[in-house]
Image: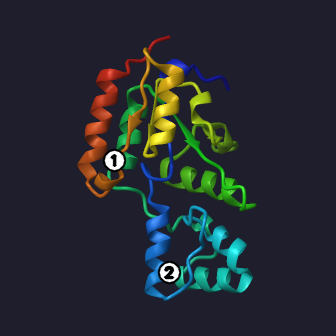
């Protein structure tokens, strides 16, 4: 399956689509559990890696899930509708997210979560819609939506002056209208070309 980069919107997962970190921190705080340190804490496997199987099982039980694949992490308000709108206008959504080297299940958990909440082009091979990279500037598309300044800056250096990344303001993530405004901006500033 070939993708034309002239109709691709690259979307980061952590931040624009879900605040995994905040949800795990909130749960750990509520139940007075230790937090993983030094890495993004948005996955149960991070807890397993740092605190062992017993803490992982306790965390799963408190969350009321078997694994992260059961999709308990909530989607940022407005994100699902925005992605659906962009797809309806002919854009291809390609998820561009950083891997977590300390977790053996991070990538598969993330792909399952994306497929469950946003759908994918090919349900038999959802991996086609996701690129795991720490250098998002190397992935081609019309624009990148990300909440980390480093990725925005690097993507703009590689792609400017014809294309620019769009910063997702994490402090506005709870505002369901924020994604709506971002979608309208994409429709105006990133026309599809073939």
- CA separation, marks 2 and 1? 25 Å
Secondary element under disc 2, as helix, strand or loop, is helix
From what the image shows, is residue 111 above or below residue 129?
Answer: below
Residue 174 is left or right of residue 166, and the answer is left
Q: Where is residue 178 in the image (x, y as percent from the top left)?
A: 27, 46
**Which residue corresponds to mark 2?**
28
Q: Where is residue 81 in the image (x, y as percent from the top left)?
A: 35, 45
Give the residue at x 71% y 62%: 103
Q: Where is residue 69 in the image (x, y as percent from the top left)?
A: 62, 64
Q: Quarter-wise, where is residue 181 in the image?
A: top left
Q: Within 10 angstroms of label 2, few (less than 14), some, or many (20 or more) residues?
A: some
Residue 9 is left or right of residue 108, and the answer is left
From what the image shows, is residue 178 above or below residue 41?
Answer: above
Residue occupying the far top of the picture = 194
Residue 110 is left or right of residue 167, and the answer is right
**Which residue corresponds to mark 1?**
169
Q: Quarter-wise, where is residue 96 in the image?
A: top right
Give the residue at x 38% y 18%: 191
Say whether residue 11 is visible.
no
Q: Residue 15 carries which label?
A: none
């Amino acid at each position: 399956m070939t993708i034309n980069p002239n109709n691709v919107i690259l979307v980061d997962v952590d931040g624009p689509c879900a605040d995994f970190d905040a949800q795990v921190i909130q749960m750990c705080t509520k139940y007075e559990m230790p937090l993983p340190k030094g890495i993004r804490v948005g996955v149960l496997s991070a807890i397993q890696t740092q605190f062992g199987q017993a803490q992982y099982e306790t965390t799963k039980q408190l969350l009321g899930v078997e694994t992260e694949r059961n999709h308990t992490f909530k989607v940022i308000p407005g994100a699902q509708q925005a992605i659906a709108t962009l797809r309806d206008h002919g854009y291809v959504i390609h998820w561009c997210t950083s891997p977590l080297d300390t977790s053996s299940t991070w990538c598969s958990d993330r792909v399952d979560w994306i497929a469950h909440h946003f759908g994918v082009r090919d349900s038999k091979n959802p991996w086609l819609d996701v690129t795991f990279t720490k250098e998002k500037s190397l992935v081609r598309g019309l624009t990148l939506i990300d909440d980390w300044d480093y990725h925005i800056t690097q993507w703009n250096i590689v792609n400017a002056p014809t294309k620019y990344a769009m910063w997702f303001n994490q402090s506005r993530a709870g505002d369901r209208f924020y994604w709506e405004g971002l979608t309208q901006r994409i429709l105006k500033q990133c026309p599809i070309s073939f």
